[in-house]
Amino acid sequence: MGIVFALSAKGLIPTRPLYLSPSISAKARYYTSRSPTKGPPTLPPKQPHNVHRRSLFGATQPNHQSSFLNDDDGTLKPGQRIAVVPGGIHSKKSSLKTTKKPQGSSDRPFIDRIQIKTRGGSGGKGCISFHRLGSYKKRPCGGHGGKGGNVYLVTDPTLSSLKMEKHHYTGRDGGRGGTNAKQGKNGADVFVRVPCGVVVRRVLDWEEIEDIYDGVAGEEGEPDTEFQSLTFEDDNSDDFDDDGEEMEEVDTEFEGQSSDEDSSDEFDDDGEEVELETDFEAQTFEESSSDDDDDYFGHRSTVVNGKYEENIDNDATIEVQEEDGFDAEYERMQSLKRQRKRRRKPRGTPSNYDDVVDQEVRGEDGMFHWSAPEMTDGNDQLAATAYSGQPMRKTVFLADLDQPHTSLLVAEGGKPGVGNQAYANRPYFSSMESNAAKKSIPGMGETAYLELELKLIADVGLVGFPNAGKSSLLSAMSRARPKIASYPFTTLHPLVGSIQYRDGYQVVMADVPGLIDGAAEGRGRGIEFLRHIERTKALVYMVDAAGVDGRDPVNDLKILGKELREYGSSGIFGENEIRGEGEYEEEMRRRRREIMNRPSLILANKMDLIPDIDAGLGRREELLFQLGLAAEEVGIFCEHDDIQAISAGVTGEGLRGLSKRLRQVVKQMG
Ligand SMILES: Nc1nc2c(ncn2[C@@H]2O[C@H](COP(=O)(O)OP(=O)(O)OP(=O)(O)O)[C@@H](O)[C@H]2O)c(=O)[nH]1
Ligand SMILES: [Mg+2]
């Protein structure tokens, strides 16, 4: 109970006491304070929006003094509305003019080669449970686990660099199976966004390289004993003690058979697998004669456990065959696991192991050095020596993601674990079977180390010496805003812009950082980015006709032609080498070799600095003529009309004609 004050024009006046619960809203209070004689409340007149505003939270903030909202005596008039708005000051940001940073400068990182690790999620575990009630009592009802999530690469046309959020991507694990045959939830897939034009390669791990090596050794019939002995090292009987006597019996039987030629004929009926096995046996047996034989057989029996046992009529194997379910599968997985473990390169490997493998690996095509050292002074020799200490990798080509919104499955999620409901329909389950699900291990997700290489997709590539005006041209013809400045190497990484035509046609042009003399040997940084012009349909050579930096345009063109020819012909410049074998790599090498056969335009820029009146038109024509001769000399594939005089940065002279011609050339090239 208390005295209620009503707000009125006269200020706060006491009215009759009312019992007000705190839950009564402010609106209710307003009505209760009104005199009943005045009739039903009417809506107050609409106030203009520019009423005084005060922050709702203003009074609680230390630096905000509360104040009355209305002008006169600090009281609210009946029907008066005030606007109470949440706090917050008017953002200054929105009033500031946002300026876009120029592209191509160092503050925007551009990454065109990266290695990432992807792993599919693990499968969920299967559940082991039994019905407790009713006629189903004691029947297995454990649900299977969920599948592990996959990892996909998806091309996103809005991206232009391989700057990734993370270097490791893992699919979500599958959920566990539940009781009452509830299946676990499938793990969510992970989509890794990459820009268009990414070439995806998978980096092989040591085991795979060794497998290749094995294959090579087998084909050539010159198995390397050292390698083999190291691979099968530690295959001693300790590991196989668990396998019990049966194994040993099998082994001895096998040994007997394999050493006896007649008995090996028995295997022929069983088809290819057996033949392969006998080959393998013959090979290992020959080599192992000098070594401890038992080691090899121990290894042999585990590797082809299942297959092998199927092929021999032996009491021991029949017993094993009976299992024919998860137990056998479990044993096989365990043995594979053990085998994998052993096959990993052991620590402290003898140096000759490395030597042997390295030589072989180096001898093959496509082997390459991973992280390249900084090329400081452009000395090829130095770079080569620095490389030699790097670990070797081998990659296989997976895909060239050049279309937008395409996805590529790179790491598959693991298979789900099996719940014991798999045995629910059996009339009788042995203890072995009912426990089989316990042993069913959910599959691990696939792991893939990927090497991603970005090759910009452009129709036209711009090459030229630093400061020639390449960025100015791109800026003048497209909506790209590269950094333009009067010092060399303003542009630090390639970027693309598209020339838009009225009818909607587009020509995409790539601005590549300036090339310099000796670029093919690694001088400067331009050569690093030349791979971005590999996909282009036409090339544009740009020279500074006025020779602002004291350069000679004709000589510049000769150097450019020479560097590009060298780049194309050998294509092996450390980092820029096209690595690996396969159709794709071959195609890329072919394309690079033909880089000089691409239709080219030669632009003499900064023509505004060559006055027509003083020196006359003759000087310009003379220059264009000389450029034509130089192009012919170095073998640039260029028509007479395609040597043009322009002024990209100042008057814009010749740009209209240039854009028309570019369109024609690109169209011709399909
Ligand atoms: N007079 C004149 N100057 C130009 C013209 N085009 C470009 N420039 C100037 O030349 C300088 C270099 O221009 P950029 O476009 O940055 O040259 P770039 O080839 O991109 O140079 P890098 O990025 O270093 O390889 C700038 O100062 C431009 O203003 C032109 O047509 N006439
Ligand atoms: Mg530039």
Image: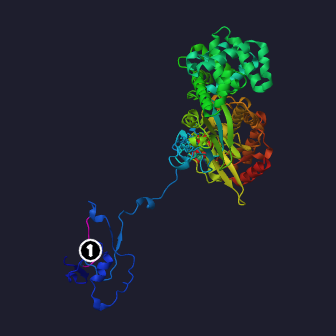
Q: Quadrant of residue 299?
A: top right
Q: Residue at x 75, y 49 (%)?
A: 666
Q: Quadrant of residue 43?
A: bottom left
Q: Quadrant of ligand 1?
A: top right
Relative placement, left or right, of 240 versus 219 is left
Is residue 133 inside the magenta stretch? no
Q: Is any atom of residue 495 visible in this view?
A: no
Residue 342: percent from left, percent from top: 58, 22
In the image, residue 199 sits, relative to residue 49, either above or below, namely above
Q: Is any atom of residue 586 visible in this view?
A: yes
Q: Quadrant of the N terminus?
A: bottom left
Q: Main secondary structure of the magenta part?
A: loop
Relative placement, left or right, of 429 versus 643 is left
Question: For mark 1, what is the residue?
Answer: 21
Is residue 68 inside the magenta stretch? yes
Q: Quadrant of residue 239?
A: top right
Give the total of numbered labels.
1
Question: Closest to the observer: 43 or 124?
Answer: 124
**Bounds of the magenta segment:** 65-72
